[in-house]
Amino acid sequence: MLTSVVHIAEVVNIVESRLGLQASIRLLARILELDNIKVAGVDEADYEEALGIAARYAVSVNDAVAHIKMRRHDIQEVYTFDKHFKNLPGIRVIQE
């Protein structure tokens, strides 16, 4: 499974706001321990590319970053409840 530093930060921030700092720290530590999760870095060039994708497909910049990382790693499926991913070409949204 692939995620990015941006998307981990989103999840950790939500957990911290709802369950507190210690819960978010434990979650992040656990995610980083898992062998089946690869964390992709995000740089300025990714955000520059994401701006165009976000505007063109009416998605958030972070969703556009996810799309970029998925394309680069030949990933076509995403598990999400974010309805905006359906706007992105070449992505199949899984909602089980």
Image: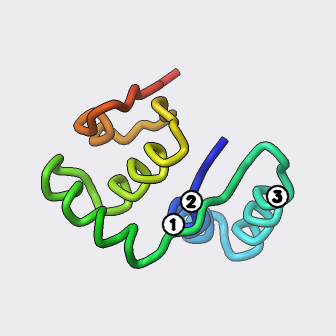
Give the mark nearest the N terminus, 1 or 3. 1
| Relative image position of residue 80 (x, y in whole percent) | 46, 37
Amino acid carrying mark 2 in the image? Ser
Amino acid carrying mark 3 in the image? Arg
Q: Identify the element where label 2 is drawn.
A: strand
Which mark identifies residue 30?
3
What is the distance, in whole Å, between disc 1 and disc 2 at their CAs? 5 Å
Q: Identify the element where label 1 is drawn.
A: helix
Residue position marked by numbered label 1 in the rendering: 6
Give the mark nearest the N terminus, 3 or 2. 2
Few, some or many C-alpha atoms within 10 Å of disc 2 (few <14, some 14-19, many ≥20)? some
Residue position marked by numbered label 2 in the rendering: 4
Q: Identify the element where label 3 is drawn.
A: helix
In the image, residue 46 sits, relative to residue 78, either above or below, namely below
The answer to whether 65 appears left or right of 37 in the picture is: left
Residue visible at 70% across and 52% down in the picture: 38
Amino acid carrying mark 1 in the image? Val
- Tell us which disc is closer to us: 3 or 2: 2
Residue visible at 51% across and 37% down in the picture: 74
- Do the residues bearing badges 1 and 2 touch, measured as CB atoms within 8 Å? yes
Few, some or many C-alpha atoms within 10 Å of disc 3 (few <14, some 14-19, many ≥20)? few
What is the distance, in whole Å, between disc 3 and disc 2 at their CAs? 15 Å
Residue visible at 23% across and 37% down in the picture: 87
